[in-house]
Image (cartoon, rainbow, N blue to C red):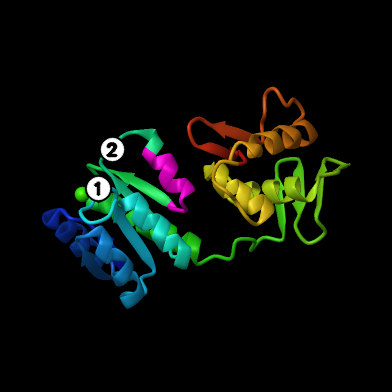
Amino acid sequence: MATILIVEDEAALARVVQSYLEQAGMAVRVEARGDRALWAVEQSRPDLILLDLNLPGMDGLEVAKAIRKKSEVPIIMVTARAEEYDRLIGLELGADDYITKPFSPREVVARVRAVLRRAGQPQFELRRIDAGDLLIDLDAHRVQRGETLIDLTPTEFNLLAALAAQPGRAFSRLQLLEAAQGQAYEGYERTIDAHVKNLRAKIEPDPRQPQYIETVFGVGYRFRKPV
Ligand code: CA
């Protein structure tokens, strides 16, 4: 049974979400203060955290940052603010997804399930990724388009593999930097643009009209879902 920690100061809202998650077969713990959330994470070792952005005690972004120093537990940010900026910061701090208030409890259950499912899968379960005429062989570290072998640097290869392993998922630049180089520092996110540019020049038939790696405005990049 998955344990979900809800960090939310609106008690009525927390109760509704709690009851929906419990009906879906999950165990739920609720914490109303940001500064109590860290303690609750250590106490109850949740499988996923639904983290409100505006919290008494400690801001949700600060909580996410602090949790990430200790744990890789999936985090879904819950935000009333519509600004893209906050969502982006949340993703860069390592949140896995976000939900904007107002939301339907059913939507929350669906998103929680999706993130849990993703978290349960090893990142590179596939050893070969077949994306249209692009073939990525993760064991051999080889990429070919049609019959042509494409030479990639290790950084470019890791970047492509991370994107193509989850087609349709939008990654922040910081997440991609981490996937590509194994570490990521805030302030260096823009270096990923240079890697993507180089990668596109190598794999895209027409780099000016990319058909594999799409730009997600205000977020980062995603690999196009094969049609
Ligand atoms: Ca709140």
Residue type at tag 1: Asn
Residue type at tag 2: Arg
Residue 92 among magenta residues: yes
Q: Which residue does the numbered mark 1 point to in the structure image? A: 54
Residue drawn at 18 percent across, 64 percent down: 19
**Does 175 sit above or below residue 125?**
above
- Select label 2 or label 1 by which is in front: 1
Earlier along the polypeptide chain: callout 2 or callout 1? 1
Report the number of numbered marks.
Answer: 2
Q: Position of residue 22 (x, y in %)?
A: 23, 68
Q: Quadrant of residue 29?
A: bottom left
Left or right, 12 with respect to 91, comes to: left
Q: Quadrant of residue 44?
A: bottom left
Q: Quadrant of the N terminus?
A: bottom left
Marks 2 & 1, CB-CB < 8 Å contact: yes
Q: Position of residue 159 (x, y in %)?
A: 68, 47
How far apart are the two marked residues, 2 and 1, measured between alpha carbons? 9 Å
What range is drawn magenta here? Answer: 86-96
Residue drawn at 80 percent across, 55 percent down: 141
Q: Which numbered dot is residue 41? A: none
Q: For ligand 1, tell me if the residue under mark 1 lies within 8 Å.
A: yes
Q: Which residue does the numbered mark 2 point to in the structure image? A: 81
